[in-house]
Amino acid sequence: MSQLAGKAQASDFRRARPIGLEYSGAKPAMLPLLLALMGLLLLLSLALGSAAIPLEQIVTVLLGGEADHASWTNIVLKFRLPKTATAALAGMSLGVSGLLMQTYFRNPLAEPFVLGVSSGASLGVALVVLGSGAVGGALLAGLGLAGDLLLTVAAGAGAALSMILVLLASLRIRSGVTLLLLGLMFGYLVGALVSLLLYFALPERIQAYVNWTFGSFSGVTAAQLPILAAFTLSGLLLSASLVKPLNALLLGEEYARSLGIDLRRTRCAIILATALLVSAVTAFCGPIAFLGIAVPHLCRGLLGSSDHRLLLPGACLTGACVALCAALIAELPGNNLVLPLNVVTALLGAPVVMLVALRHLRGVE
């Protein structure tokens, strides 16, 4: 009987793994390599741009010294350092949030953008930015830190509400495709509400919101960065505490319950972690697509494992690397042209999604 149970559990595990990837053995040695790659990309992000700055000058500025040109010190500390830190934090947040959702829903296409969680966060921002009108907009600008917190809390409330709706739907709907369609329809519904707000908003508010939807890591200032870091690190720490429940959920909720996992508490923790990770990134950087769905698959392929003890740090490092690459490509180093960030993330993430879908179809045939 124990052998039959073991075979049944192994079969369930194979079905529970994200579709389209084979695991030939864990590769924990990839984590140091990803960390080294992230360090290199951090330096490149600080060095490259419309004005190229030598790496030794970057290191000098970061260690508290003065660069050969005073303008280089200002460029690094006031502009490129906040942008680089924002890209790394946003990549970590979106990568881990996508991993949480794919594991919980046991669906390889689940991620905050597809399931409408990012749309809910966008609606929260739109209600504050567009619904406030001229008086509210001026008030937010004058409030400074309080205004930034208000935007982040509004985005978090919208993301949490969307996540709760998706979880309630998942309790009644077992089809992953149907759940994804509901998420997309929720996104269209939110888009309609935002369009209604745009129709009645003032022109300057409309332009500010449209620019925000393009996505950018460059809009976060040094004063705003601690808010983003606080929300992001809180979400990452909460996600790290969910390693055991997430591994158990790979085999289904019944198996997790048999191990003594409190599913209600786990569900609430996943909602809170996802809201923390998505809200601040969406509020400050815009609704960034494809990172949440592509990063977990890249991470699983690199690490060759479905163990969240490896996947969580791997998703952090992989997400940061992909986001930093996207930021470098978007700014086209050496030119003054800056591409919309969502264009670059779509070019990087869409091939990964198509590969996953094709491998899924191949496995079904």
Image (spheres, rainbow, N blue to C red):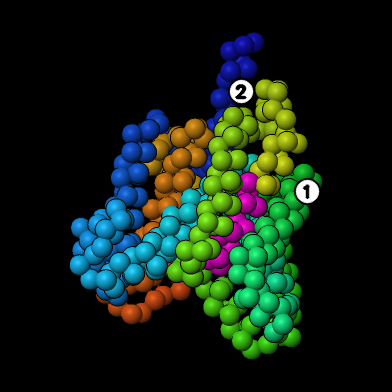
Image coordinates for residue 284, horizontal then vertical, percent: 55, 65
Above or below, comparing residue 14 to residue 168 in the picture: above
Residue under the point 69% across and 84% down: 134
- Name the residue nearer the viewer: 219 or 282: 219
Q: Which image quarter: residue 132?
A: bottom right
Above or below, comparing residue 232 to residue 326 in the picture: above
Query: Along the horizontal axis of the image, is 182 left or right of 94?
Result: right
Residue under the point 46% across and 35% down: 310
- Residue 139 appears in view: yes
Image coordinates for residue 202, horizontal then vertical, percent: 68, 87
Verify CB contact (< 8 Å) between mark 1 and mark 2: no
Secondary structure at badge 1 equals helix
Above or below, comparing residue 231 to residue 249 in the picture: below
Query: Along the horizontal axis of the image, is 312 left or right of 249?
Result: left
- Name the residue nearer the viewer: 363 or 184: 184
How crowded pointer 2 is (Cα within 10 Å; few <14, some 14-19, many 20+) is rated as few
Please report whichever mark, 1 or 2, sits nearer to the chain's N-terminal start: 2
Please, what is the three-letter code of the amino acid marked with disc 1? Leu
Q: Which mark is residue 8?
A: 2
Quickly name the residue at label 1.
Answer: 168
Specify the segment rendered in magenta.
273-289
Magenta span: chief secondary structure: helix
Residue under the point 48% across and 67% down: 221
* Image label count: 2
Q: CA distance from mark 1 to mark 2?
A: 29 Å
Q: Which image quarter: residue 337?
A: bottom left
- Name the residue nearer the viewer: 277 or 340: 277
Secondary structure at badge 2 equals helix
Which dot, 1 or 2, sits closer to the camera?
1
Please, what is the three-letter code of the amino acid marked with disc 2? Ala
- Name the residue nearer the viewer: 203 or 85: 85
